Amino acid sequence: MSWSSKQIKLAQMACKGAGIEDEHRRLLLGQFDGRAMVNGRATSTSPHLRNADFEQFMASVEAVSKNQQLQVRDPRGRFVYGMCHWQQAAEDGAPKRLRYIINGLLSRIQDAELGLPIPSPSTVTNGRTQELKHLTTPELEKLRSALYAMAKRHGLLERTS
């Protein structure tokens, strides 16, 4: 899902407040494995950018902002976000969100009783752990991708009306 117009506007305001010029902003957008690229140019309006990318982008902008705080204020002049808000969200939110998604996919796959081996934490860590809570963010992403592909291949992601 692409960034909403509110997210795009917030990202622009944050960059302006941090003194980040267009070239630097495009470099920050370039860190998302090409998802920000449209016609060979990095842009926040790319339809391939995800919410996790937004959080990471905001964390990067925050890291170069004065006092590591986004210079975005509400109508009363108060800062909207505390110090290191987005950096903490990027650290905490991604793994928590990924574990939630993985549990949902696992539930659908197990309920379908496909009789096939189901990708597990052990699969993506080469046996290092069977515990979802011990996976790193890249390992969680890898497991999510494997489960998503399996669920999609077997028609488990279709909406029922």
Image (spheres, rainbow, N blue to C red):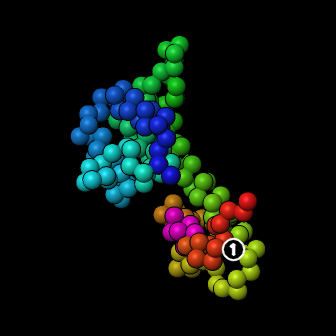
| Residue positioned most to the bottom | 115
Q: Is residue 43 magenta?
A: no
Question: Is residue 148 in view?
Answer: yes
Vertical comparison of 158 with 54: above or below: below
Residues 62 and 112: in front is 112
Indicate the amino acid at tag 1.
Ile
Is disc 1 placed on a helix, strand or loop?
Answer: helix
In the image, residue 151 above or below residue 1: below
Q: Residue at x 65, y 66 (%)?
A: 158
Q: Position of residue 80 (x, y in %)?
A: 52, 25
Where is mark 1, residue-wise?
109
Binning the other alpha carbons within 10 Å of mark 1 as few (below 14), some (14 to 19) or many (20 upward) gives many
Q: Is residue 23 left or right of residue 79?
A: left
Residue 152, picture quadrant: bottom right
Specify whether 154 is left or right of 69: right
Residue at (56% x, 48% y) in the render: 92
| Residue furthest to the front | 161
Q: How many marks?
A: 1
Which of these two is toward me, 22 or 37? Answer: 37
Estimate the x, y position of residue 147 in percent, counting from the top left. Answer: 59, 72
Q: Main secondary structure of the magenta part?
A: helix
- Residue placed at 48% from the left, 21% from the top? 73
Point 52% across, 29% down: residue: 82
Horizontal and vertical percent position of residue 113: 74, 80
In the image, the segment drawn in magenta is: 141-148
Q: Indicate the position of residue 29 as horizontal and vertical percent values.
A: 34, 47
Above-or-below relation of 123 to 161: below
**Residue 65 visible (yes or no):** no
Front residue (pair 50, 122): 50
